[in-house]
Image: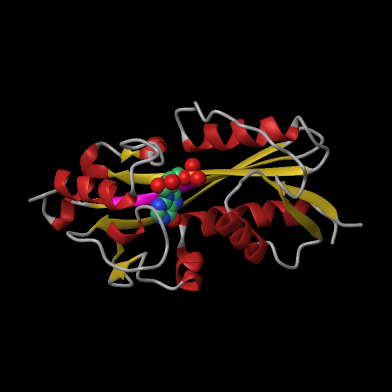
Amino acid sequence: MKTKLIFATGNQDKMREIREILAGLNVEILSMKEAGIHAEISEDGTTFEENALIKAKAIADMTDAVVLADDSGLEIDYLNREPGVYSARYMGEETSYEIKNQALLKRLEGVEKEKRTARFVCAVAAVFPDGEIIVKRGTIEGYIGDKPEGENGFGYDPIFYVEAYGCSTAAMTREQKNAVSHRGNALRAVRGELEKRIQG
Ligand code: IMP
């Protein structure tokens, strides 16, 4: 029988990515909606790990399935790792990313490339029915460019450049980004742990 696994997100892109990365495992992957779970969870932790765990635990209390949740964001070194865990809330949830990205570029105006280092961070938490907890962190290192570029991706992708690709993550294809992204890396680490605990 397949193990039921719920990914605590309402985001369809994240669901697609997790299905791709966990393909081949003996699990039935459900979104919260598909599992019939509706919950508003406040992410009031101070780290990505804490927030991922808050979400996963809250949902795990409502089901016997394995529950996965993630939390992610952008850290800009020159800005003391802002916006960090506040990435979604930076300048207000309703503010467009065009405006948020322009504001960040403005705050970095005149700052030389070497000091514009940044990373996307993602923590993925897994809570098992017996209460066992696993949390894995994935990152992707890059820098903030001096102008937005690219039409793919979302959020801060247009201003986040990866040296090895010579472009922003918004200029990469979905497959290219998933292969090196913070979320991809964290999910692949969790896959390794699931493989040990879930019977094929
Ligand atoms: P959450 O993990 O869904 O709470 O999202 C955190 C926020 O971090 C998003 O709303 C984006 O602003 C930002 N973020 C996280 N991952 C990415 C990414 O891959 N590209 C661009 N922005 C991201």
Give the colour scheme of this rendering.
Answer: secondary structure
Asked if residue 127 shows in the view, the reply is yes
* Residue at left offset 55%, top offset 52%: 186
* Residue at left offset 41%, top offset 57%: 154
The picture quadrant where one finds residue 152 is: bottom left
Residue 175 image offset from top left, x and y in percent: 51, 72
* Residue at left offset 53%, top offset 36%: 49
- Image quadrant for the N terminus? bottom right
Q: Is residue 163 magenta?
A: no
Q: How many marks?
A: 0
Residue 164 image offset from top left, x and y in percent: 32, 70
Left or right of 75, for residue 29: right
Residue 151 image offset from top left, x and y in percent: 35, 68
Residues in magenta? Answer: 118-122
Residue 66 image offset from top left, x and y in percent: 76, 44
Asked if residue 72 shows in the view, the reply is no
